[in-house]
Image (cartoon, coloured by chain):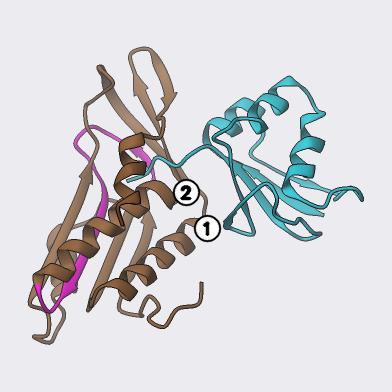
Amino acid sequence: MIKLLYFARFRDQLDCAEEQLALPAHIDTVADLAAHLSERGANWRGTLADSQALVAVNQEISGFETAVKDGDEIAFFPPVTGG
Amino acid sequence: MTAATPAKAVDRIRVQTDDFDLQAEYQTLRGIDAAAGAVVLFTGLVRDLNQGDAVRGLTLEHYPGMTEKVLADIVTEARQRWRLLQVSILHRVGALAPADQIVLVGCASAHRGDAFAACEFIMDFLKTRAPFWKQERTAGGHRWVEARDTDRDAAKRW
């Protein structure tokens, strides 16, 4: 299983804050995962294709080329606006 | 991040709903010995106007766990660049009203140059790296604050 988290505008757009997902066999990278999730519908496709979308794998800022493995925690979110 | 000079036990990194007390934080940064010759404190406040609209308040959310790690990494990086005795980063989350305190960054050093520079560096990196998000309440409803190019430019100069 992998743990998926969505924050801020992305959570609103996807109507999902957190989920567990059995990692499908063909998913090796964040990009593969984003493509898999995009099959859920237009709001998923639009949100994850956002050119500003950021991803963290195990709480480290990562890229869409980053490898994904079972047990990982993966978060998708828009650019940060704290401070 | 592996580092020669990691964030130290004396450093205070807190994500909290409660307000913070500048005087108390200043006393902490002054420390109990006389090594500190300079303490620089920055506070960020909620403004009542953004993009021409009156802001009734903000809700700040964050990524628990990752936020604290990113802030610790930023302190580690600051400690590699400047000679710092003690660093504090306090950041509030939850519902805030105009004029409320949002964030405090405090740096203590032997001489002022290190504390001034580190304080600005930490804020610039916090604004572009730490996973916090602001949602504004205006007369027109709720809206997520967009990231600003000026913040990205400020972080690039380091």
Reading the image, the residue beneath label 2 is B131
User: Disc 2 residue type?
Assistant: Pro
**Disc with the residue nearer the chain's start (2 vs 1):** 1
Residue at 16% in and 59% down: B41
Residue B101 sits inside the magenta stretch: yes
Q: Residues within 10 Å of mark 1 (few under 14, many from 20)?
A: some
- Using the image as rendered, state which of residue B139 and residue B49 is in the foreground: B49
Reading the image, the residue beneath label 1 is B66
Real-space CA distance between mark 2 and mark 1, rounded to the nearest whole angstrom: 7 Å
Query: Quadrant of the rendered structure where residue B36 is?
Result: bottom left
Q: On screen, B5 above or below A67?
A: below
Pick the quarter of the image with the C terminus of chain B: bottom left
Left or right, B99 with reference to A67: left
Q: Which residues are magenta?
A: B93-111
Residue at 53% in and 37% down: A78
For this orientation, the residue located farthest to the right is A25
State whether residue A4 appears in this view: yes
- Using the image as rendered, state which of residue B38 and residue B149 is in the foreground: B149
- Look at the numbered discs 2 and 1 and tell me whether their residues touch, using CB distance below 8 Å: yes
Return the x and y of residue A10 as percentages of the image width and height.
59, 32
Chain depicted in cyan: A
Residue at 69% in and 55% down: A73
User: Disc 1 residue type?
Assistant: Met
Q: Considering the whole magenta stretch, tell me its main secondary structure.
A: strand
Return the x and y of residue B8 as percentages of the image width and height.
35, 79
Residue B113 sits inside the magenta stretch: no
Q: Colour of chain B?
A: brown
Left or right, A35 with reference to B115: right
Secondary structure of residue under mark 2: loop
Disc 2 and disc 1 on one polypeptide chain: yes
Left or right, A52 with reference to A68: left
